[in-house]
């Protein structure tokens, strides 16, 4: 049985290892929803146990919040895990992007992985 959408999103985000990032679109594709829905789910996080800070935009940058500013705490947490940013605030996704959960993880969850196009 598949959990409600936010539960599925959070389960995926929990798998992103320290020192790596995932994009909103990447999590969305894996969870079967839109990137915007992943953003809403991240904004609703109420626990420090979920590594919400590891989800960034597809340009390799921390997304602006509703006040139009990037979250300095998200930068701080990612840097503390070894994720580097250039002078524009961009990280190299070819180095730091998580490759996604293993087939074993999908089987443990009893969920079907998304189909490749």
Image (tube, rainbow, N blue to C red):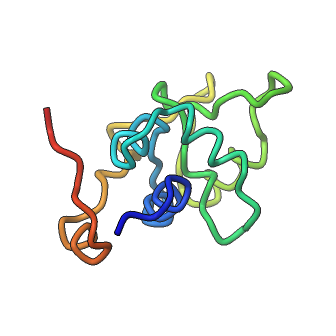
Q: Residue 34 location in percent, x, y?
A: 46, 33
Residue reaching furthest to the bottom = 108
Residue reaching furthest to the right = 67
Q: Is residue 102 left or right of residue 85?
A: left
Rendered position, 1 above or below 54:
below
User: Residue at the location (64% across, 48% down)?
Assistant: 42
Q: Is residue 78 left or right of residue 21?
A: right
Rendered position, 26 above or below 47:
above
Please state which of residues 57 and 11 is positioned toward the viewer in this rendering: 11
Please state which of residues 86 and 39 is positioned toward the viewer in this rendering: 39
Numbered label tally = 0
Please state which of residues 116 and 72 is positioned toward the viewer in this rendering: 116
User: Residue at the location (50% across, 53% down)?
Assistant: 5
Q: Where does the C terminus fall, quadrant-wise? A: top left
Among the 4 quarters of the image, the one containing residue 63: top right
User: Residue at the location (43% across, 59% down)?
Assistant: 12
Q: Is residue 57 left or right of residue 65?
A: left
User: Residue at the location (18% across, 65% down)?
Assistant: 103
Q: Residue 7 location in percent, x, y?
A: 52, 62
Q: Residue 15 location in percent, x, y?
A: 43, 65
Q: Residue 106 location in percent, x, y?
A: 25, 67
Q: Is residue 3 visible?
A: yes
Q: Is residue 17 visible?
A: no
Residue reaching furthest to the left = 117
């Amino acid at each position: 049985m598949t959990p409600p959408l936010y539960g599925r999103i959070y389960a995926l985000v929990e798998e992103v290892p320290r020192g790596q990032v995932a994009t909103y679109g990447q999590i969305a594709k894996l969870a079967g929803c839109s990137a915007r829905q992943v953003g809403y789910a991240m904004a609703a996080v109420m626990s420090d146990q979920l590594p919400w800070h590891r989800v960034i935009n597809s340009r390799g940058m921390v997304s602006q919040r509703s006040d139009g500013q990037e979250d300095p705490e998200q930068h701080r947490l990612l840097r503390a895990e070894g994720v580097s940013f250039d002078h524009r605030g961009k990280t190299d996704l070819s180095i730091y992007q998580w490759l996604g959960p293993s087939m074993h993880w999908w089987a443990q969850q009893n969920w079907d992985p998304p189909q490749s196009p």
